[in-house]
Amino acid sequence: MSFFNFYVGLILNNLNLSEKLKKICSYAAMASIILPFGLFIKGMMGVSEDVPPFGIVGVIGIVIA
């Protein structure tokens, strides 16, 4: 996830986007760090249907970034 955030940071400087879009992309990339924690929590609680999808926030962050 660190390489992903580093890569997004390097690319954002070179893109011709507005500052607002750059901030949205940056925050979405930072939200992607939640994915491994969500998967860890889901693994610790067991793989059942009752476990809320904690990692979906990280997945959405990766897709947006």
Image (spheres, rainbow, N blue to C red):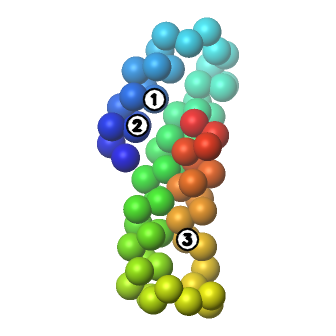
Residue 27 visible in the displayed image: no
Circle 3 residue = 54
C-alpha gap between disc 1 and disc 3: 23 Å
Mark 1 residue type: Val
Q: Which residue is mark 1?
A: 8
Tell me which amino acid carries mark 2.
Answer: Asn
Q: Residues within 10 Å of mark 3 (few under 14, many from 20)?
A: some
Name the residue carrying label 2. Answer: 5
Residue at 66%, 16% (x, y): give it. 18
Q: What residue is shown at x 33% (from left), y 42% (from top)?
A: 2
Q: Position of residue 22 (x, y in %)?
A: 59, 25
Res 65 → quadrant: top right
- Looking at the image, tell me whether mark 1 or mark 3 is earlier in sequence order: 1
* Disc 2 from disc 1: Cα separation: 5 Å
Which structural element holds mark 3?
A: loop
Depth check, front residue: 26 or 51:
51
Give how far apart the Cα atoms at labels 3 and 2 are: 20 Å
Q: Residue at x 62, y 88 (%)?
A: 49
> Dividing the picture into quarters, in which one does residue 45 lie?
bottom left
Residue 1, can we see it?
yes
Q: Earlier in the sequence, mark 3 or mark 2?
A: 2
Amino acid bearing label 3: Phe
